[in-house]
Amino acid sequence: MSNQSSSGMSASPQQSKNILAHVRRDDDGSFVIHDLEEHLRAVASLASEFASVFRASGWGHLAGLWHDLGKYSSAFHTDIARESGFAPEAHIEGGQGRVNHSSAGALHAIEKLGGKGRVLAYLIAGHHAGLPDWYSDEYALSSLSQRLEDKQHLRVISSVTIPTDVRHPSMAPVSKPLGGEEGLALWLRMLFSCLVDGDFLDTERFMDGEKAKGRGEFSDLGMLLGQLDKHMAKLTADVMLTHVNRVRAKVLRQCRERASDLPGIFSLTVPTGGGKTLSSLTFALMHAVQHSKRRVIYVIPYTSIIEQTVGIFRGIFGENVVEHHSNLDPEKETAKSRLATENWDAPIIVTTNVQFFESLFAARTSSCRKLHNIVNSVVVLDEAQLLNQEFLQPILDTMNLLTQHYGVTFVLSTATQPALNSREGFGWTFRGLNDVHEIMADPDALYRNLERVTVDMPKDFHARREWEEIAAELTTHDSVLAIVNTRPNCRELHRLMPEGTIHLSAAMCGEHRSFVIETIRERLKKNVPTRVISTQLIEAGVDIDFPVVYRALSGLDSLAQAAGRCNREGRAQRGKVVVFVPPKPSPPGTLRRAEQTTVSLLSGKSSDPLARELFTRYFEHFYIKADSLDKHGINDLLTRDARELKIQFRTAAEKFKLIDDAESRTILVWYGESPVLIGKLKKDGPERWLMRKLQRYSVTMPRRVVDTLLETGEVQEVWPGIFAQAVSTLYDSEAGVTVGGALAAEQLIG
């Protein structure tokens, strides 16, 4: 956008007669005006374009045209023109003394469209502060119903000159919400995404033209598919033609053959070690090209394993892969990837369950901004069995809506398929996914072909074994992996093992865990004797291969995932997996229920405990036993009064937290370069690049534990709301955070 156009005219506060949208200060000290009328038309055009992919361009156009009508008021111009000149940030609502400029457009929409105007009222009223609730409950001051009662904002703009085609456009939107009452909240959130992304992008073009130029310029999906084909051809030629690799080639071939199937929901059921990662990516990319999808989004359950996947993808596609998660190292970002994480405008996105699903239920502008770019995409859910059971119903309902109305194809990729199809039985109904299609022609045969382990189950599920007994047994093996259910269990068993045994848990920061996992891989590759005690974080996609694996009794899916770390490459004729009953049961909640479901399913049975047909029964029982698949009432908040366009967006967003921030706190620990970074934080404050870097050195713990550590002086508040290690004894170079017996409960299962 040229600085010499109407949106780039130099002015002083006294000289300017333009209606302002924004203002910036150039290097020479002069102010440059972003003309409001031009901004409204530009945002209307962008929002309309974005919304056209789900047939709602008319709504997007009006939302963009009216979102900043309040900036026509004289009060806004008084606010933005200060004694010292124009204030570049004055256009943002919410600061002390800032003028409310979003209510005017919301009220105008109601006046023009009646009840239907509430659609636009939500979007416009929330385009800075986030989508509001309708009712005055927890967020009374920001509820939409209350804001719409304040008619003064409408009176303020009624007397000013606004172009007729802006105030009274000739065309009213005619498209209806997608998905009926159940889909209204998602449809509104999609429209909100179109508006806020359009607003951000046009504002960015004016405020920071160089930054705007850095967007886009990625390769198209057809070119990326060509790169993938070359990589897979080379990989196939280079690897040894073992039995396992022949099976992997068969999996890949079937994924290629099924990629032309009509869009919908697919399951990819392949045993661990069967090459799911590259095969699922091949299916997704081929399917996207053949059906004109816009991007591939690869969703992974844990940040602890995302680097492995991103490393593989970047080796094939370079900068066309954008990773977006909380622990991203800024040194691995480029200018282009940083911009793409804001709105996912890239061909391949790798993200986490938390980032993907919390965004779909978010209210904040920054989180919602990317949503319209999920439309018409292929989404691969890696390790799909790890979808959070307490939020499962709203998640599945939203997946159905995305598939039926927004052109999204889902691929549920896992060795332990979680039986998410709709089903019902005597006295129960499970509202699951609609029409899930399995990609593999014969998963049972595939499992038989990839049988690489013998599983020893306990003869008596009630006969508990002490840690000392388990440790003594582990010590008889040169290389062995033992997986337990909680961090305290991991620390206790590790303490009893010989020197040199490796510890791995979420009590260690991300940088520490990554180093340890790579160390394990290198040792195993060189046949160096390696004993590892780990929590279940090692089960979800970490590519390691032990001859012997011990697993504490847990959910059947966890037992199968643990078995996938044993004889993974089929180097031995048979690997050995030993399931043992630990000294104490798992903490109450999901983990204990999973353990109990396994016991009830396998007690008195002598058949293969990892037989594929058992998993359907396991998950059916597991879901039926759940207290609720919508523990926090998300669906009720979003659909109960949807017919009257009364939706609790903000409360639903606050409650939809896959990780409960209210019950936990994150501390920065001393590891590697982190003491220097923490020192810089204390001195200069939380700059964005610094906080992104420090996330690699963070550990999440229960709030009550951190509060105790604050009282004892072992942790200190180094900046308001930011906590860091204060004494050297808190973090162990092998085991991470060590705080005695205070660690317990399900928060410490990682």
Image: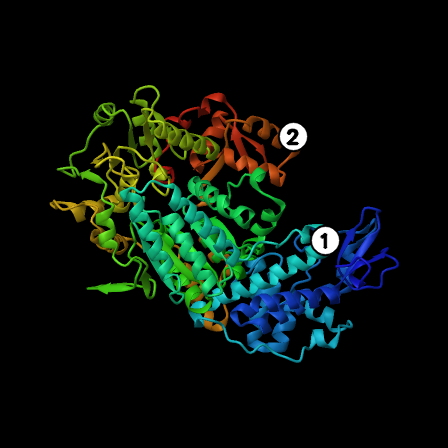
The amino acid type of the residue labelled 2 equals: Lys
Which sits in the foreground, 322 or 719?
322
Judging from the image, what secondary structure is the residue with disc 1 in? helix
Q: Can residue 251 be seen in this view?
A: yes
Rendered residue at 44%/71% (across/down): 179
Q: Residue at x 46, y 41 (%)?
A: 307
Relative to 576, 232 lies left or right: right
In this orientation, which residue lies closer to the viewer: 656 or 260? 260
Nearest the eye: 49 or 544: 544
Rendered image: mark on residue 416? none
| 493 is higher (above) or lower (below) than 571 | above
Q: Position of residue 197 (x, y in %)?
A: 61, 59
Drawn side of residue 334 relative to residue 418, left or right: right
**Residue at the limit of the structure toward the right, as seen here:** 15
Mark 2: secondary structure: helix
- Residue 58: name its quadrant: bottom right
Q: What residue is disc 1 on?
A: 209
Query: In the image, what residue occupies the spot 36% across and 49% down?
Result: 276
Which one is earlier in the sequence, the residue at label 1 or at label 2?
1
Residue 269: x and y in percent read 30, 53
Residue of label 2: 683
